[in-house]
Every structure is written in structure tokens, then in C-alpha cells.
Image (cartoon, grey):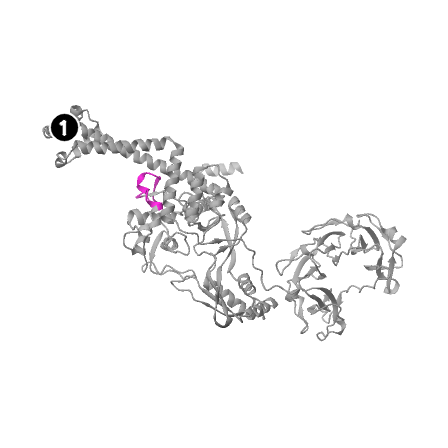
């Protein structure tokens, strides 16, 4: 294969696969480096950098100039620097002018530049723009040889590779973008805090993350809001460069007449808008059936009823003077305020996640996810180098001026001789250089001076300027000769810029608990009633006789589970998936209940293996027909989605009915389909909080399966089955007989009794004096022939 490729390469042929691979790689690199990701040095993407440079140096649209049409700016940028679509350039310029997108806008927009609610900007022929004052922090040092310039796309112009940023704009304004194989989501930060962090690293390069976070605690969003994530979470995000913050809207209660009150939201999280919040409330109070459904789901109905019971009116009172003002009026003044806030915030984007992914192009030109300390140190190094280049440029200009002034000083007292040489010589430069010992640069300067300026040459003026230049040059040389002195100078400049352009923090950083959906439920005893056909409902209290309850025609009592209203009902399918339903979400005793399929989405072909309910710490025993099992807790089994989660691995078998483990149940009894029973201590079974296959419970022969496995007490076990003529028979085992079957895990066990032609299950033998437990419900067949296990 290698020789074939070499031959093709030698012959100049290019296969389609090689061409496609090379073309896609070039495209990917272009998207990553030239479009989507910002640079750590100036925080700008290429299109943003080109817009700023063109507006500053080509169109001279500084903050003190008049506005010009945005179309003129876009056209000039496209023609000289950015050979892409005009809409992409205009969109980039619009974003730089939006105060709700950038913490420190770089473009001063005049006209409709869009809104936070998603309204688009006006066309570029209608809007106008110029640079803001703060853009000077990016552009003011361009003419001082601080950065490298590279040719534009056609070589006709030069553009800066990066801008000489005086502050780290990659943190000040952040960035958002999707490249090929990577994305970035950098939040904005406060200018004063970022400047303080940079000064800290300049003064103490060995400063750690905790010291930096003391002055730069968290992002500072343009719209304010409140960061409620714990400090440890924020620290971990900044340590790794990736994570998610929890951000909450800020609000206040306004008191009204006659004891009425209302909730007013004044600041929103970065990803939220007033229109979005109103739309979310509309979808809760006026829901539509989900795709493929003809009616509302129980969750939709419950959410609608709960919201309408709390919320009376909602309206948006935002305007150009008040960017955000959402007013929520409760149904009555008796509504609990905390519950009202929790219901709104937990179901809308008033409280939401704000992702952080600090991916950018580093000073080495490579894209990478960077922690906060690395970002700050890279920028500090870039700034020190920039200031060094600026100082060297200034020193070079001063030395050239000193050299010129020294030449003028030499000819100061011989002006007449200079004029004579110039008038009488065809080549005056060599004559001047010989007559006054001038260099080429000095002689050229004398020849370029106008005749009327020669008479104004004053010895005092020249010597005064020469002294000033020498003094400044000496101080610059001292600055360049000491790294510590240069670092202090950079720190002073950063402090001055922070004083000139800094502002107060807008986003409050105050840890808080995430608001839970819905009001707190009352903890009371309830009974879950499951009918024979799988309809489920609840009834307050315990001790109900479910045979006296009403059911649908053709249906009847199935099973009752006594629990608490705060518990979670766990459903285990035959395929080993675990489903969970909050008992508080189940319908009440009015009506005949709802089918189980209204609450969970069981996979096709699966059946219910069992249902459990109880406290989260309640241990439960799970096993499959493969002969494997493990112990877990009810609190480990709930799933977050209706589709459940894989919990018990069954492979080509199926799950057995899960069993709760009582305090006195110290043994495990396992029955194979060939009538062999094995009993062993429960301590030999592993605990698997995350689920899985478990350990081998019983040694099985090829093709053999487990019929039943359950925890039992030392009182004994009852083996259920069929005798001759399929007559039901039971074989109780206790005392010495039970001891004959008590071995160790993975043994094959012993046959129970020849009188049992076929075994069907196990049941714990109750201790003497204890009430006989209700027999477990068996699969029943409804009128349509469907099997339901309850």
C-alpha cells in the first residue's frame, strides 16, 4: 500500500480520498484559527480585529469623530482585509456595539442594533457606527512598532497579526464560537478585577489561583444577575478551564395597597431574555400536546394547575430606560412568597446554567483550553513584550533625534559657511560631511531644513531639546535594562487604565441553593393502589381494603403499596431498567387512576418485574434469571428521565422481582427451574450502588435459569410449585431441613422434593406468631390477552 501511494505521488496523481482529507484539514484549520476562536493577546477574532483596525487607521472613526454608515465600514473591511460575506462582517460589528452582549462595547452604534429579546438589527444601510472611547486600549499603540504586521489576503495592504491590547480583552468581553472539533464560551469579567489580577501577577509571578480569585472572584455579566454556584465550583472551573455556573435573576418584592404585593425581576441571567421567560410561562399555563400525543400528559396538567394556582398576571414593563422589568402578580396575597419565587425560577430560565469553556488561540498560535492562571500569565508576558517593543521604538526615535540635534549643534555657529557650501557645490552633502565632520543622516537633515529655518536655529533651543531627549533616553535605557522595573511600569499603566475605564461589578456573587421545582410536599402516609390492568392511583392513609374500591369495567384490585407522600415509587422492568415516579405526582383517589405508561416510557417488549417504595436508605436485593444478583439501595435506583436507566444487567435473561431486605433477613434463598434450592448468608452478596451484573448466586447447568431469589429470615422458606396433575403444592423448609440447603454462594444446591414436578417460586416462611403475609401478585391476563405483572 505504501509503494502504491508513493508511485501515485511520484506520478503527480492525487486520489479523491487524499484530496478530500487535505481539503477538509485546511478548512478545519482555517475555521479554528481565522474565524471562530479569539486570541489570548487581544481577545479578538480575526473579523473583529479587522473591523477595529479599519475603523481606526483607515476610516479614522475614533470616538471624537462623527458617525458614518455601517455599510461604508463593512464595504471597506471586505475590500481590504476580510474576503468573506458582508453579513458575517456586519453581524460581528453589531455584536461589538451591543451593550447586552459585550461587557465593554468597542463600537458605538447609532440606530437599531438589535435587542436582548432576539430582535435583529436594522440593515447596514440604515445604521451608523464609530469606535468607543475604550477601544483606545486596543488601538492606541499600533503606530509604535508594538506588534507585527502581515500582508492582507491579496498583499495590497498590511494588517496587524494581533492588536496591542493594554488589558486582557479575552476576559473583559469574553467570546463565544463553534469551530471544527472545538468550541469556546468565555464569559465577560470586570475590568477593575481583571486589572488587579494582572497587577498581582506582575508583582508576584508565583501567585497561586486562590490569590488571584481573591481579586477576581467570578465573571461579571453585562446584564448583572446573581451567580449562586459555590466558591469551590467556581475555583474548579477556573482551575480546569471548563465547567458550568448556576446564575439566577435578581428580583425584589414591591408592596401594594391592601396588603397586595408583586414580584419584579430587574436583572436576567446571560442566556435569558424577557421574551423567553414569558414564552416559557405561556407554555406552562397553556401547554400543547407533545408530538405524537392527542392529549396533555399528567406532568403537563399538573404543572399547569400548579402554576395557575400561584400566578395571577405577568407582564413585561421593560423599555429603553429600564432594560429589564418583568412583573409577576400572585393569584392572591396569601401565596407564600418563597414558594412563588421557587415555582417561577425552577421552571423558567430565570435560573439557569451558564457554561464556561476557556478555549482560545494561545500566544504560540495553537488553540487550547486554558485555565485562568495560564490565560493571565500569557497575557502578562505579551504585555511586557509589547511595552518593551514600544519602549525600544521610542528609544530609537529619541536616539535618532539626538543624533540630528548634535549635527545641527555643530553647524549652529557657521550658518554662512553652510549656505556658501550649499550654493557653490553640485554635491553639497559630501562637502558638508567633510567640513563639519557630519554623518550622512546629519548632513541630510541640514540639507532638508528650509532656508528660513536656518536663521531661527538657536543654540539655547537646540541644547534645551537635546538635554530633554538625552534625559528621556537615559530613563528608557534604565527601564529596558531591568525586568523588575519594566514589570512595575506595566503594572502602573494597567492601574491607570483601570482607573480611567473601570466600573463597579454588576453581577452579584452570592452562593445559594438551586431552587427546587414545585412546592414542598406534606409528608403523610399514603397507599399506592395498582389495579389488575396496571392503572395506578393513591389514597391517603394506610390499612385500606383495596377490594372494596371501584375500578374500571373489566378491571379489579391488583396490589397495594403503603408508603409516604415524599417517597419515590421504583419500577423495575424485565429488561433490568429502573424507572422512578414521585408519589406526589400520582393521581389521587378520585377516578380510576391513570395507566402506568402515562408516567414512564418502558421499552417495547418489556414487562414490569416489580414495584418498590420506601426510604432512600432501604436496601433492596436484585437478581436475574442468569443466576447473578447484588444488593443496592432504593435511593440508587431513581432515574431522571421517563425512559429510565439501565440498572440490572440481564443479557439474554430477564429480571426477577426485586425484594426489600428486612432487618431480620440474613439469608438469601435461590431456586433453579430444575428444582434445586440454595441458601447462603446475605453477607456473601456484593453491594453495587451503580447497578450492574452482580455476583454469581448459584451454580447453574447449561441452559438452566433461576426461577426465584429472595432474602429470608432464619425462620425458613416455602417452595411453591405443582405436583401431579398440575396440582398446586408447597414445601415448607425450616429448622434442620433449612440447614441442609444452607451452603455457600455459587454452589449448585440440592433438590427440594420429588413431589414437586415443577417449581414456580419462593415465599418466606413467617415466624411463629407473626401474621401471614399477602401472597405476591402473579401475572394476570386481561381480556386482550396481555400479561401484566404487578
Q: Is residue 156 magenta?
A: yes
* Residue bearing mark 1: 413
Relative to 194, say whether 570 is above or below: below
Residue 34: percent from the left, percent from the top?
41, 46
User: In the displayed structure, does residue 165 sit left or right of residue 367?
Assistant: left
Quadrant (top left/top right/bottom left/bottom right) for the N terminus: top right
- The magenta region covers 137-157
Can the viewer see residue 244 in this picture? yes
- Compared with 179, 534 (above or below) is below
Q: Is residue 469 magenta?
A: no
Mark 1: which secondary structure? helix
Residue 730 in which image quadrant: bottom right
Classed neighbour count for the residue bearing mark 1: other residues with Cα under 10 Å, few (<14), some (14–19), many (≥20): few
Count numbered badges in the picture. Answer: 1
Residue ranking furthest to the front: 258
In the rendered structure, the answer to whether residue 549 lies left or right of residue 241 reads right
x and y, in percent, of residue 387 in the image: 36, 38
Residue 215: x, y in percent? 46, 45
Classify 589 as above or below 722: below
Inspect this view and state whether residue 39 appears. Answer: no
**Relative vertical location of residue 471 with respect to residue 266 in this rendering, above or below:** above
* Quadrant holding the C terminus: bottom right
Residue nearer the viewer, 214 or 94 = 214
Amino acid at each position: 500500500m505504501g509503494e502504491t501511494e508513493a508511485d501515485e505521488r511520484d506520478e503527480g496523481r492525487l486520489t479523491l480520498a487524499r484530496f478530500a482529507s487535505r481539503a477538509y484539514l485546511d478548512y478545519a484549520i482555517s475555521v479554528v484559527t481565522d474565524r471562530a476562536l479569539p486570541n489570548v493577546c487581544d481577545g479578538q477574532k480575526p473579523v473583529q480585529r479587522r473591523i477595529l483596525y479599519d475603523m481606526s487607521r483607515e476610516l479614522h472613526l475614533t470616538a471624537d469623530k462623527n458617525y458614518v454608515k455601517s455599510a461604508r465600514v463593512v464595504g471597506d473591511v471586505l475590500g481590504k482585509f476580510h474576503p468573506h460575506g458582508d453579513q458575517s462582517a456586519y453581524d460581528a460589528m453589531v455584536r461589538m456595539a451591543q451593550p447586552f452582549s459585550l461587557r465593554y462595547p468597542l463600537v458605538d452604534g447609532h440606530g437599531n442594533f438589535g435587542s436582548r429579546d432576539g430582535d435583529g438589527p436594522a440593515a447596514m444601510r440604515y445604521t451608523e457606527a464609530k469606535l468607543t472611547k475604550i477601544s483606545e486600549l486596543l488601538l492606541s499603540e499600533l503606530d509604535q512598532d508594538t506588534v507585527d504586521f502581515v500582508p492582507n489576503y491579496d498583499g495590497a495592504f498590511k494588517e496587524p497579526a494581533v492588536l496591542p491590547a493594554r488589558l486582557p480583552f479575552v476576559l473583559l468581553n469574553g467570546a463565544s464560537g463553534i469551530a471544527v472539533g472545538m468550541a469556546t464560551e468565555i464569559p465577560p469579567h470586570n475590568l477593575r478585577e481583571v486589572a488587579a489580577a494582572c497587577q498581582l501577577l506582575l508583582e508576584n509571578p508565583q501567585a497561586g489561583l486562590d490569590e488571584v480569585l481573591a481579586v477576581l472572584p467570578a465573571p461579571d455579566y453585562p446584564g448583572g444577575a446573581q451567580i449562586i454556584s459555590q466558591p469551590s465550583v467556581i475555583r474548579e472551573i477556573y482551575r480546569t478551564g471548563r465547567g458550568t455556573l448556576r446564575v439566577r435573576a435578581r428580583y425584589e418584592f414591591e408592596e401594594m395597597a391592601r396588603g397586595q404585593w408583586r414580584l419584579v425581576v430587574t436583572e436576567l441571567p446571560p442566556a435569558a431574555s424577557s421574551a423567553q421567560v414569558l414564552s416559557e410561562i405561556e407554555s406552562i399555563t397553556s401547554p400543547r400536546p407533545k408530538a405524537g400525543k392527542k392529549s396533555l400528559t399528567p406532568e403537563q396538567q399538573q404543572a399547569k394547575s400548579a402554576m395557575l394556582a400561584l400566578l395571577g398576571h405577568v407582564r413585561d414593563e421593560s423599555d429603553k430606560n429600564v432594560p429589564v422589568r418583568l412583573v409577576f402578580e400572585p393569584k392572591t396575597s396569601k401565596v407564600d412568597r418563597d414558594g412563588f419565587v421557587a415555582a417561577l425560577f425552577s421552571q423558567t430560565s430565570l435560573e439557569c446554567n451558564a457554561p464556561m469553556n476557556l478555549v482560545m488561540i494561545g500566544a504560540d498560535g495553537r488553540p487550547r483550553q486554558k485555565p485562568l492562571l495560564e490565560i493571565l500569565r500569557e497575557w502578562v508576558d505579551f504585555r511586557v513584550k509589547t511595552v518593551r517593543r514600544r519602549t525600544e521604538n521610542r528609544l530609537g526615535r529619541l536616539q535618532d533625534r539626538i543624533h540630528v540635534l548634535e549635527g545641527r549643534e555643530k553647524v549652529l555657529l557657521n550658518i554662512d559657511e553652510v549656505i556658501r557650501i550649499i550654493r557653490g557645490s553640485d554635491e553639497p552633502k559630501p562637502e558638508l560631511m567633510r567640513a563639519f565632520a557630519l554623518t550622512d543622516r546629519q548632513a541630510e537633515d541640514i540639507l532638508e531644513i528650509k532656508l528660513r529655518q536656518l536663521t531661527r536655529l538657536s543654540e539655547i533651543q537646540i541644547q534645551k531639546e537635546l538635554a530633554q531627549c538625552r534625559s528621556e533616553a537615559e530613563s528608557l535605557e534604565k527601564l529596558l535594562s531591568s525586568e523588575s522595573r519594566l514589570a512595575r511600569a506595566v503594572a502602573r499603566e494597567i492601574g491607570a487604565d483601570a482607573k480611567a475605564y473601570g466600573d463597579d461589578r454588576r453581577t452579584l456573587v452570592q452562593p445559594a441553593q438551586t431552587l427546587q421545582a414545585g412546592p414542598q410536599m406534606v409528608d403523610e402516609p399514603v397507599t399506592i393502589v395498582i389495579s389488575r390492568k396496571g392503572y395506578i392511583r393513591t389514597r391517603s392513609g394506610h390499612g385500606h381494603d383495596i377490594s372494596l374500591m371501584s375500578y374500571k369495567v373489566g378491571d379489579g384490585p391488583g396490589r397495594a403499596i403503603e408508603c409516604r407522600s415524599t417517597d419515590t415509587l421504583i419500577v423495575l422492568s424485565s429488561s433490568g431498567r429502573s424507572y422512578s415516579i414521585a408519589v406526589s405526582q400520582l393521581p389521587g383517589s378520585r377516578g380510576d387512576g391513570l395507566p402506568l405508561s402515562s408516567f414512564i416510557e418502558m421499552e417495547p417488549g418489556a414487562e414490569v418485574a416489580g414495584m418498590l417504595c420506601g426510604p432512600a436508605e432501604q436496601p433492596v436485593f436484585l437478581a436475574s434469571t442468569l443466576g447473578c444478583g447484588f444488593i443496592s439501595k432504593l435511593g440508587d435506583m431513581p432515574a431522571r428521565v421517563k425512559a429510565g436507566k439501565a440498572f440490572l444487567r440481564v443479557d439474554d435473561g430477564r429480571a426477577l422481582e426485586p425484594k426489600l431486605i428486612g432487618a431480620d433477613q440474613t439469608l438469601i434463598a435461590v431456586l433453579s427451574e430444575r428444582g434445586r434450592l440454595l441458601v447462603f448468608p446475605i453477607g456473601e452478596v456484593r453491594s453495587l450502588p451503580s447497578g450492574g451484573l452482580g455476583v454469581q448466586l448459584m451454580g447453574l447447568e447449561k441452559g438452566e435459569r433461576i426461577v426465584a431469589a429472595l432474602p429470608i429470615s432464619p425462620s425458613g422458606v416455602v417452595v411453591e410449585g405443582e405436583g401431579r396433575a398440575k396440582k398446586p403444592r408447597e414445601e415448607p423448609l425450616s429448622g434442620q431441613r433449612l440447614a441442609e440447603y444452607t451452603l455457600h454462594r455459587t454452589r449448585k444446591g440440592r433438590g427440594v422434593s420429588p413431589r414437586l414436578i415443577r417449581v414456580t417460586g419462593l415465599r418466606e416462611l413467617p415466624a411463629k406468631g407473626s401474621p401471614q403475609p399477602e401472597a405476591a401478585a402473579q401475572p394476570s391476563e386481561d381480556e386482550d390477552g396481555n400479561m401484566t405483572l404487578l
